[in-house]
Image: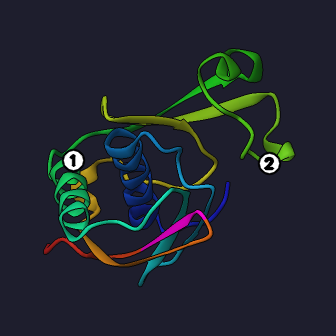
């Protein structure tokens, strides 16, 4: 299992699904997830508008605030390939594929660590973005929930 910060990794899943739903683009093709700040790269066709930035942040936070359970299921590689793109999984992921579900909002193959419920993630803060040569890079961080 890859060792990512579970809160940041769960937020990345929600951001990916939000980008898919808002723009019809694919999930991030590259990311760097750290406790303090993270980034995701998307194949895209233009920079974002200020309104889109606000809407992405609003939608991601709406999902996180919904207290969705984060669950995992295991499928054979053959079964998983019927519903999911397995291209980004390392060859070492084997014959059993782990699918992470965030409520009914998102489902994708993943080898990383996640929280048990989105209430553990905190607030998604859109940091900045850049657009160059068909790549949109989104930088973000999390404000931790008050305990």
User: Could you tell me residue 42's position as x and y percent?
Assistant: 54, 58
Q: Which one is nearer the viewer's eye here, 119 or 142? A: 142
Q: Main secondary structure of the magenta part?
A: strand
- Disc 1, SS: helix
- Above or below residue 24? Residue 30 is below
- Residue drawn 29% across the image and 48% down it: 117
- The quadrant the C terminus occupies is bottom left
Residue 15 as seen in the image, left or right of residue 50? right
| Residue 136 is covered by the magenta coloring | yes
Left or right: residue 147 versus residue 83 is: left
Against 90, residue 73 (above or below) is: above
Seen at 45% across and 54% down, the residue is 114
Where is residue 61, by image quadrant?
Answer: bottom left
Image quadrant where one finds the N terminus: bottom right
Can you identify the residue that label 1 sits on?
A: 63
Provide the residue span drawn in magenta: 134-138
Residue farthest right in this picture:
91
Write down the quadrant of residue 75 in the picture. top right
Residue for badge 2: 90
The one nearer the camera, 54 or 77, is 54
Q: Is-magenta flag for residue 54? A: no
The residue shown at (39%, 36%) is 106
List x then y, in percent, for residue 51: 18, 64
Structural distance between the alpha carbons of marks 1 and 2: 28 Å
Q: Name the residue: 82% across, 35% down.
A: 94
Q: Secondary structure at mark 2?
A: loop
Total numbered labels placed on residues in the image: 2
Task: Give the crowd class for mark 1: few <14, some 14-19, many >=20 residues within 10 Å.
Answer: some
Residue 6 lies, in percent from the top left, at: 45, 62
Q: Which mark is residue 119?
A: none
Q: Are marks 1 and 2 in contact (CB under 8 Å)?
A: no
């Amino acid at each position: 299992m890859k060792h990512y910060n579970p809160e940041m990794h769960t937020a990345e899943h929600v951001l990916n699904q939000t980008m898919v739903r808002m723009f019809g683009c694919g999930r991030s093709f590259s990311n760097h997830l750290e406790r303090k700040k993270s980034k995701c790269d998307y194949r895209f066709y233009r920079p974002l508008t200020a309104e889109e930035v606000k809407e992405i942040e609003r939608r991601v936070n709406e999902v996180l605030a919904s207290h969705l359970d984060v669950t995992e299921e295991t499928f054979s590689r053959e079964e998983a390939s019927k519903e999911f793109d397995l291209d980004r999984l390392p060859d070492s992921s084997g014959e059993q594929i782990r699918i992470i579900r965030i409520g009914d909002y998102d489902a994708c193959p993943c080898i990383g660590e996640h929280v048990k419920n989105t209430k553990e993630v905190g607030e998604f803060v859109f940091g900045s973005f850049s657009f160059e040569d068909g790549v949109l890079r989104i930088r973000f961080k999390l404000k931790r929930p008050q305990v």
